[in-house]
Amino acid sequence: MRLTGKVAIITGAGQGIGEAYARRFATEGARVVVADVNAEKGAIVARDIGAVFERVDVASEEDTRRLARAVVDRFGRIDVLINNAAIFFGIDNQNHSYAYLRKIFDVNYFGAWLMCRAVFPHMRDGGGGSVINQSSGAAYVHPEYPIEGDDLPSFHYSVTKAALNAMTHYMAGCVGKYGIRVNAIAPGPTLTEATRQGVPEHIMELIINFQMAIHRALDPDDLTGTAVWLASDDAKMVTGQVIPVDGGMIMLG
């Protein structure tokens, strides 16, 4: 087991990709903290894998600091943070208002930043750690947004993930001297409930058949090996990287 003894906080771990990370980390020996705003779903996952559940709204500074303190009080350390929580399930791709853009940024970008800030002193004092940000292939793909009237599209989801990539680079350069590594995973189209709900089947087929070198969608489990590696000591000299796990989608442009 590659993560024996490591304490890992995984946000948005009540379902989808975050749940897959939590389950895989538990099998690799990590002490997992399932952190989710949905207490019902998060508690079920935590109970199923023998983990700890903590409710957190990552857009709340108070919540993120409380979560970090609770984990340190319980386990004495924080070794890994996976910033997976994001607004994607049920996202309104037709809403380009400023208020909705701010809402998406509050969770997808500022939520990750707040979590990093909350765990930083504990990772530093513990001698280091690994932060893994959940990016997306959407940060690289330029979709066609029709312009109606005078309003410009906000590109909300894609822009938050592009911003997260930039934060990954800047933060890695800043905290490396404390033994903290910061990387990101950029998945391609992944078969979660959120994707099934938000991406029409014919669009998914076009992406798979014409925009990916490996002609199949990802399962959440396809991402977990990369996360385990980044969290492990095998990646102790890897930082500041955004790693596409996308079947060759970004490679093909």
Image: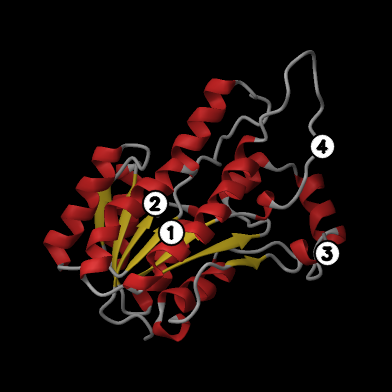
4 or 2: tag closer to the N-terminus: 2
Circle 4: is it few (<14), some (14-19), or many (20+) Cα within 10 Å? few
Q: Residue furthest right?
A: 210
Q: Quadrant of residue 246?
A: bottom right
The CA span between labels 4 and 1 is 31 Å
Task: Identify the element where label 2 is drawn.
Answer: loop
Q: To which residue does mark 4 refer? A: 144
Q: Which circle marks residue 19 in the picture? A: 1
Distance of mark 3 from mark 1, alpha carbons?
A: 29 Å
Q: Earlier in the sequence, mark 3 or mark 4?
A: 4
- Location of mark 3 (residue): 252
Q: Are marks 3 and 1 in contact (CB under 8 Å)?
A: no
Amino acid found under the numbered disc labelled 2: Gly
Q: Could you tell me residue 3's position as x and y percent?
A: 35, 80
Q: Residues within 10 Å of mark 1 (few under 14, many from 20)?
A: many
- Residue 100, how many percent across, how many down? 55, 25
Q: In the rendered structure, which amino acid carries the disc numbered 1?
A: Glu
Mark 2 Cα shell of 10 Å, populated few (<14), some (14-19), many (≥20): many
According to the picture, the residue beneath numbered tag 2 turns out to be: 14
The residue at the point 27 percent across, 66 percent down is: 123
